[in-house]
Amino acid sequence: KAGVTQTPRYLIKTRGQQVTLSCSPISGHRSVSWYQQTPGQGLQFLFEYFSETQRNKGNFPGRFSGRQFSNSRSEMNVSTLELGDSALYLCASSLVTGNTEAFFGQGTRLTVV
Amino acid sequence: GENVEQHPSTLSVQEGDSAVIKCTYSDSASNYFPWYKQELGKGPQLIIDIRSNVGEKKDQRIAVTLNKTAKHFSLHITETQPEDSAVYFCAASIGGKLIFGQGTELSVKP
């Protein structure tokens, strides 16, 4: 059974640009959550999507957005990139929404220069 | 607000010894507490979890305990091995959102 797949693994972008990251959850899982991991702030929740609807949102500016498709694949977008957006972006897949097991992908390492 | 405190931040043990990592959460609405192991260059891996209606759970060398009254939960690893070396994160789930502790870097010396 394939795990959570995130693409790309690495990205380098320039300040002011925008970026789109992709996440394919485990087959049959319908919930996808996104997290930002940095050395200073640790792992922080961005948002969760279930059945193509955003169910929960963390404390991030509106430059961070996401969506989920009918096949449960999800994308997150960051517009007007800032140096502080450099981080490991992790996607977690769950069977359903709510307090249940979440399985993480390997992450996308974004560097903003 | 929602907060999870994790201690210690670093832990060094000899192979074969036990390791204990402790976490405290703030929101009494939390009812699901997973633990993750993250190795260098990889995403967090779920290693064990516990729900608020259970006080203890074991899986081979790993056990987790939960004290709902005190809002504490702990990870216990017995008979540590060098391959247990990694960063461990506790988390508390509120409505599907995971609030993570800051992590514990465990080093197991052969």
Image: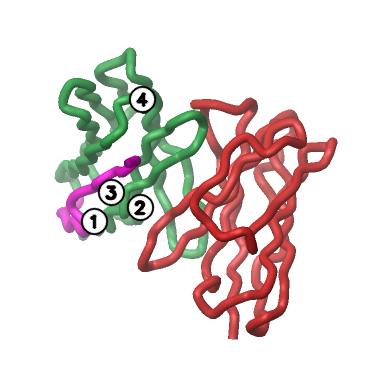
Chain colours: A red, B green
Label 3 to label 4, Cα distance in Å?
A: 35 Å
**Nearer the N terminus, badge 3 or badge 4?**
4
Per the image, the residue denoted by label 3 is: B81
**Nearer the N terminus, badge 1 or badge 3?**
3
Q: Do the residues marked 2 and 4 share a common chain?
A: yes
Relative image position of residue B48 (x, y in whole percent): 39, 32
**Disc 3 versus disc 4: nearer the observer:** 4
Label 2 to label 1, Cα distance in Å?
A: 8 Å
Residues at discs 1 and 3 in contact (Cβ within 8 Å): yes
Name the residue at the front extreme.
Answer: A62
Relative image position of residue B110 (x, y in whole percent): 22, 59
Secondary structure category for the residue under label 2: helix
**Nearer the N terminus, badge 4 or badge 1?**
4
The residue type indicated by label 3 comes to: Gln
Label 4 to label 1, Cα distance in Å?
A: 35 Å
Estimate how packed mark 4 is, as few (under 14), some (14 to 19) or many (20 or more) residues with alpha carbons within 10 Å. few
Secondary structure category for the residue under label 4: loop
Locate residue B71 relative to residue B39 in the image: left or right: left
Label 2 to label 3, Cα distance in Å?
A: 5 Å
Q: Do the residues marked 4 and 1 share a common chain?
A: yes
Please provide the residue range marked out in magenta. B1-15
Locate residue A56 relative to residue B14 in the image: left or right: right
Residues at discs 4 and 1 in contact (Cβ within 8 Å): no
The residue type indicated by label 4 comes to: Ala
Majority secondary structure of the magenta segment? strand
Residues at discs 2 and 3 in contact (Cβ within 8 Å): yes
Which chain does the numbered disc 4 sit on?
Answer: B
Residues at discs 2 and 1 in contact (Cβ within 8 Å): yes
Per the image, the residue denoted by label 4 is: B29
